[in-house]
Image (cartoon, rainbow, N blue to C red):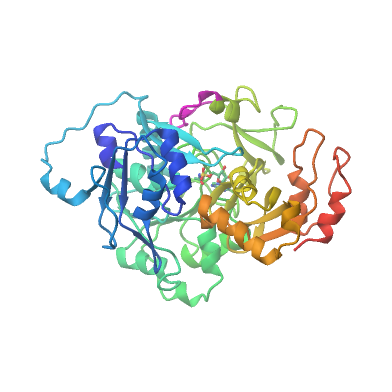
Amino acid sequence: VLACARIGAIHSVVFAGFSSSAVAARINDSECKMVITSDGSYRGNKAIDLKGIVDEALEKCPSVETVLVVKRTNTEVNMKEGRDLWLQPLMDAAVGNNVAEIMYSEDPLFILYTSGSTGKPKGMVHSTAGYMVYTAYTFKNVFNYEENDIYWCTADIGWITGHSYILYGPLLNGATTVIFEGVPSYPDFSRFWEVIEKHNVTQFYTAPTAIRALAKESLDYVQRFPLSSLKVIGSVGEPINEEAWHWYNDHVGGKRCPLVDTWWQTETGGIMISPIPFVTPTKPTYASLPLPGIQPVLMDELRNEIEGNQVTGALCIKFPWPSMARTIWGDHQRYKETYFTAFPGKYFTGDGALRDEVGYYRITGRVDDVIIVSGHNLGTAPIEDAINEHPAVAESAIVGFPHDIKGNALYGFVILKETGESRDKNNLAKEINQQISDQIGPIAKLDKIQFVSGLPKTRSGKIMRRILRKIAEGDFSNFGDISTLLNPEIVEEIKNGKL
Ligand code: 7RM
């Protein structure tokens, strides 16, 4: 990432948990010429065959001319003549007089893909100056950064949080940033606290899904460590529930470190709504107040701005800010449609929010078709596309339902073709999950698959997800208005078959 920025090349980091077809889709959309990968990578005690995944992807990627391979696991890999090169010998031969390329402020710095509510992932483009100015500014203020601090963010580099708050924000401030390759549960549930203790970490930034997973285990794992070096703790990625907030605040922050619940998005580039430590009093589950320069508004269904406090609505941002994504790579029209048409003249976040009696914001979750599973944003459409490619499947719809650890898990409603009806349903469910795993990645696998004879649809053919969501959650109390359904009788059948 840093080397690319230095020579003025646009980078696009891809999460190492993706399948070869997800990698190929991103390479082809960006038409990139070079891929940098490694012979393998570790996730806990599992090794991932990264080079194998890349090789498979590249069979479908004509734009790629060169592949640089980092030795990491020392596993044997296939090196394609004329295309693949080991990185280390090239580094050894390189001359160290590289001068930083001067860039224009609006030149693209990187592309980062994020799932959308329709099939194709969106390549969000961030600019050189605005992005760096804003991540530097927010890092310093939201984490109360002071010289000699040791800052640690546990995110994956393949996520915007890794870009903005492992690399760019901290490094632009000359901060020491801890980079961690692993999982919170390996070798045991003390891993995070051990690392904090070992390196005297002063700021710790992680996701609610990790907190919930650790809070489920014995308190002893965290209580063994005094964690007295900590000054500020942070949360990002999804709404943090009350229980997790208190556990984090009490047992990690020792009730003395401000807990910054930071709301922002790939598209916003940097933190938008967050307490400022030692300035903004924190309130459990509230991201609290916008940072200086950011102007959130809540909108109603009629596209009117909702004034006053103790209200809920669709969260929009009224004016531009330095690090807003500039476009979707290769599709500026989609950028305009996705973010600026639902509420004309405003940036629509896709999230719903509540504003309390003193003006604090609480993010209530997505109002569009993105489901956050263990901190990963998954679009429903690409997963449904993958399911529908199974030869026995006619149609499908997936929704999220609350899960203790993952935050949300996926529930799939699947209509079979006639040829599928006679098949063993357990085997079919396994095959469907395999299909998802191959096309998107294991993170997108469904926890529950219910076979149904139809889906609740409006006359215009839109699946009414709101009803499916309620059924998946086990809430049969009130489905709201189902009079616009083409087939209202299907609701009863789906309800009776709930898993
Ligand atoms: C940074 C990041 C963006 C979506 C966003 C929200 C959700 C993120 C919080 C949150 C409640 C938070 N980028 N989200 N942070 N919801 N409280 N503090 O996560 O592009 O991957 O996801 O994540 O729904 O729109 S992202």
Image x and y of residue 132, in percent: 36, 35
x 60%, y 55%: residue = 284
In the image, 221 versus 44, the foreground residue is 44
What is the magenta segment's predominant secondary structure?
Answer: loop
Image x and y of residue 324, in percent: 47, 31
- Location of residue 49 by image quarter: bottom left
Task: Say left or right for 145 vs 342.
Answer: left
In the image, 186 versus 197, the foreground residue is 186
Q: How many marks?
A: 0
Q: Is residue 444 visible?
A: no
Magenta includes 330?
yes
Q: Quadrant of the C terminus?
A: bottom right
Image x and y of residue 451, in percent: 74, 57
x 47%, y 34%: residue = 124
Image x and y of residue 125, in percent: 43, 32
x 44%, y 47%: residue = 159
Q: Is residue 437 visible?
A: yes
Task: Say left or right for 14 vs 3.
Answer: right
Q: Quadrant of the N terminus?
A: top left
Give the magenta-colored segment's residue range: 319-333
Task: Say left or right for 203 vs 484.
Answer: left
In the image, 449 versus 235, the foreground residue is 449
Magenta includes 169?
no
In the image, 456 versus 150, the foreground residue is 456
